[in-house]
């Protein structure tokens, strides 16, 4: 199952030339205001007819110049910033609404109600729901339209921080349990880091890069697009056990690591963030350091003050001054040690 997008469209002042693949999982469309995210969503939805190109969902052509399916024929479920529920209908009737006009819709009612914990809300009307509950209902209604693709256009933008925190676990559950491509438009780096499996970076009407989140995060050339403070690796870890002093011992592709003040059970999977400005490099094995995690690494490339390293199968970034690059001889292929000052664990 995947969405395949390639189209061109000219607006006065901006030529769009957009191409990417969105596999099963959350594909985040990320880029500055005016780069073409909404236009891309509209072209996929059938609200804008591109000048040329091909858009296909699971090999089914939605648009290719000859074919141009109407929006309601595309099997796309939407969740917008504002939940857009029918105010006069209960949550249950909102959820059952797609089944009125689409065959096959509504058949997973019980499963989806359970997945999003909507049971206690079924007889309530939208005006009595919190922002997070409205969005959960909107997600449920989108899933009950029997979609082949889910499009979420800034679904958290209208919520305050505590409501965002409340709905995040549901979005993660959606990502992990629903075998659909989910296109997710967001301006928020933390949201993208927590949810996305694939990242599509856009600038001025073009896709500059797209691919798995981990690969893009560890690419020093792309750091400016995400914001320099956010540059750094995402590392998958498995908890191996607890040290006598309470530290957590984890296994990663970069080697074993120790984590402080993290509560997790043996065998649990964790996602770790190691920011580039939390990594120091040394050419010799460091001694007498307070840092817990010292990992042997090899330099892959240096770009814009960031050194990309490879540690086994894991890529990592270190922020280093040009002077240090020079004095340490951090050229591609150089062996070194990455001293990780701190690691944060992404919630899951
Ligand atoms: N119907 C239109 N006619 C002319 N120009 C348009 C039209 N729709 C969009 N544009 C222009 O195309 C560009 C891309 O707009 P778009 O709304 O897709 O960007 P965006 O990335 O979604 O921005 P934002 O993050 O602010 O929502 C903008 O410069 C916009 O003014």
Image (cartoon, rainbow, N blue to C red):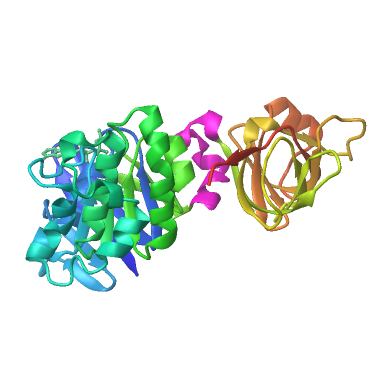
Say if 269 sits above or below 292 in the image. Answer: below
Is 259 magenta? The answer is no
Residue 121 x, y percent position in the rendering: 25, 46
Say if 346 sits above or below 50 in the image. Answer: above
Residue 126 x, y percent position in the rendering: 17, 39
Say if 54 sits above or below 194 in the image. Answer: below
- Residue drawn at point x = 34 percent, y = 61 percent: 181
Q: Closer to the camera, 56 or 149?
A: 149
Residue 98 can be seen in this image: yes
Q: In which image quadrant can residue 142 be found?
A: bottom left
Is 226 magenta? The answer is yes
Q: In which image quadrant can residue 57 be found?
A: bottom left
Q: Closer to the camera, 184 or 137?
A: 137
Residue 23 x, y percent position in the rendering: 39, 63
Q: State left or right for residue 213 relative to residue 185.
A: right
Residue 200 x, y percent position in the rendering: 39, 49
Quarter of the picture for ligand 1? Answer: top left
State the quadrant of the N terminus: bottom left
Q: State left or right for residue 79 relative to residue 180.
A: left
Please give the range of residues in magenta.
213-230
Q: How many labels does the image show?
A: 0
Majority SS type along the magenta span: helix
Q: Closer to the camera, 55 or 138?
A: 138
Q: State left or right for residue 226 relative to residue 63.
A: right
């Amino acid at each position: 199952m995947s969405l395949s997008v390639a189209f061109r469209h000219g607006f006065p002042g901006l030529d769009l030339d957009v191409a990417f693949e969105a596999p099963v999982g959350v594909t985040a469309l990320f880029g500055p205001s005016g780069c073409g995210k909404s236009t891309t969503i509209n072209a996929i939805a059938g609200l804008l007819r591109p000048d040329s190109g091909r858009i296909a969902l699971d090999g089914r052509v939605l648009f290719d110049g000859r074919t141009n399916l109407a929006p309601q024929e595309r099997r796309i479920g939407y969740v917008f910033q504002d939940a857009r529920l029918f105010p006069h209908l209960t949550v249950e009737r909102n959820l059952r609404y797609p089944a009125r006009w689409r065959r096959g819709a509504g058949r997973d009612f019980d499963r989806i109600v359970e997945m999003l914990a909507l049971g206690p809300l079924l007889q309530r009307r939208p005006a009595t729901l919190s922002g997070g509950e409205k969005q959960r209902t909107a997600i449920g209604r989108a899933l009950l339209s029997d979609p082949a693709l889910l499009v979420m256009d800034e679904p958290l933008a209208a919520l305050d921080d505590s409501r965002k925190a409340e709905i995040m676990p549901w979005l993660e559950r959606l990502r992990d349990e629903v075998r659909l491509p989910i296109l997710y438009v967001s301006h928020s780096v933390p949201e993208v880091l927590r949810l996305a499996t694939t990242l599509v970076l856009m600038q001025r009407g073009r896709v500059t890069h797209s691919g798995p989140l981990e690969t893009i995060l560890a690419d020093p050339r792309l750091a400016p697009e995400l914001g320099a403070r956010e540059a750094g690796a995402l590392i998958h870890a498995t908890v191996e056990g607890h040290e006598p002093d309470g530290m957590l011992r984890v296994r990663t592709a970069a080697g074993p690591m120790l984590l402080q003040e993290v509560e997790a059970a043996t065998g649990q999977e964790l996602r770790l963030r190691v920011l580039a400005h939390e990594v120091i490099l040394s050419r010799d094995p460091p001694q007498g350091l307070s840092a817990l995690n010292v990992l042997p690494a090899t330099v892959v490339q240096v770009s814009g003050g960031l050194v990309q390293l490879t540690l086994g199968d894991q890529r990592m970034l270190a922020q280093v001054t040009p002077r240090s690059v020079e004095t340490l001889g951090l050229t591609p292929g150089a062996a070194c040690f990455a001293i990780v000052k701190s690691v944060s664990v992404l919630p899951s």
